[in-house]
Image: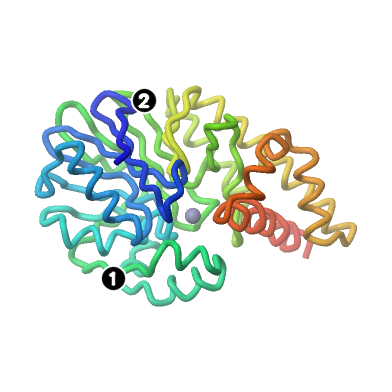
Amino acid sequence: MHTKQVGENIFLIDLETGGFKNLIASYVLKGTNTIIVETGPTASIPNLLSGLQELHVALDSVSHVAISHVHIDHGGGVGTLLKKLPNAKVIVHPRGAPHLIDPAKLWAQSKQVLGHVAEIYGEPLPVPEDRIITATDGMALDAGNSLCLETIEALGHASHNLSYFESLNKSMFPGDAAGMYIGEFDVVVPTTPPPFYLDVALQSLEKLASFNPKALYYSHFGKADGGVKRLRDYAAQIKRWGEIAEDGVKNGQSQSAITERILREDEAMRKAADYFQAHPVLVKTAIENSVQGFIEYAEKSQA
Ligand SMILES: [Zn+2]
């Protein structure tokens, strides 16, 4: 299995979803009790459990499972995981909670939006209502040993995204609020599927930067230093994508023409383009769906 220490008492588990390394991460905060940040999808729960075993985490020591949002690649596995964790509560934004309790609609939408990728992730199981704690800004989750997570409402990517800040290491777990980090190329790519709200996303990035994080711990994928700069750079990047989409929509360009211009003008996309085009999961999620989010946002703002 693939676990790695990524901070004082913080560990990363590579969930290797669908056999893909460096795609989806789960983080483990080990204090006197244990907090898990992000579960990944249903299909990855066996790997998450063997990661916990490798880290010598007793399953009854897990007090909280904190998910950023209910999209199935982040929180899809919660229902399955909870069956193994007798004492854990789930932390989720109030607008996400109904989809954990009854995931039928979420699963139907996931299949529609993600196509075959949804099948790689697997169908989410329901979460018992009495195991859910809803949170927005400022809830403190204590892991003991000076490790404490604070919840931050960071909307834009989803109408219910939570980010988490850990002050001992100054670690920020943005969920999908800060894009997707591809360590191999040291680039960040927008995570902006429809319905995406650029103005809200930019406000969230400012809010996350105000915590002065030293590093970002991306769900996709891994730890990257230079937290504040990365948040600011991402803001500039999505502003640029927004301008290109707006311009394209105004001039009646097709989605593929707009995509081509983004791939041409955005250095990060240029660097990682071949990697994305060849990646069975990312070709759909990182390019097609993200560009579509900007186009629909531009159409709405011009209507
Ligand atoms: Zn998402």
* 91 with respect to 56 (left or right): right
Residue at screen point 30% across, 28% down = 5
Q: Say which mark, if any, is on residue 126.
A: 1
Element type where label 1 sits in the image: loop
Q: Please tell me which residue lies in front, 280 or 118.
A: 280
* 161 with respect to 81 (left or right): right
Q: Say which mark, if any, is on residue 192.
A: none
Element type where label 2 sits in the image: loop
Q: Please tell me which residue lies in front, 233 or 122.
A: 122
Q: Please tell me which residue lies in front, 51 or 62.
A: 51
Can you give x and y, in whole percent of width and height, for residue 238 in the image? 66, 42
Image quadrant holding the N terminus, namely: top left
Q: Please, what is the three-letter code of the amino acid marked with disc 1? A: Pro
Spatial CA span between label 1 and label 2: 33 Å
Dot 1 or dot 2, earlier in sequence: 1
Can you give x and y, in whole percent of width and height, for residue 118 in the image? 48, 66
The residue under label 2 is: 170
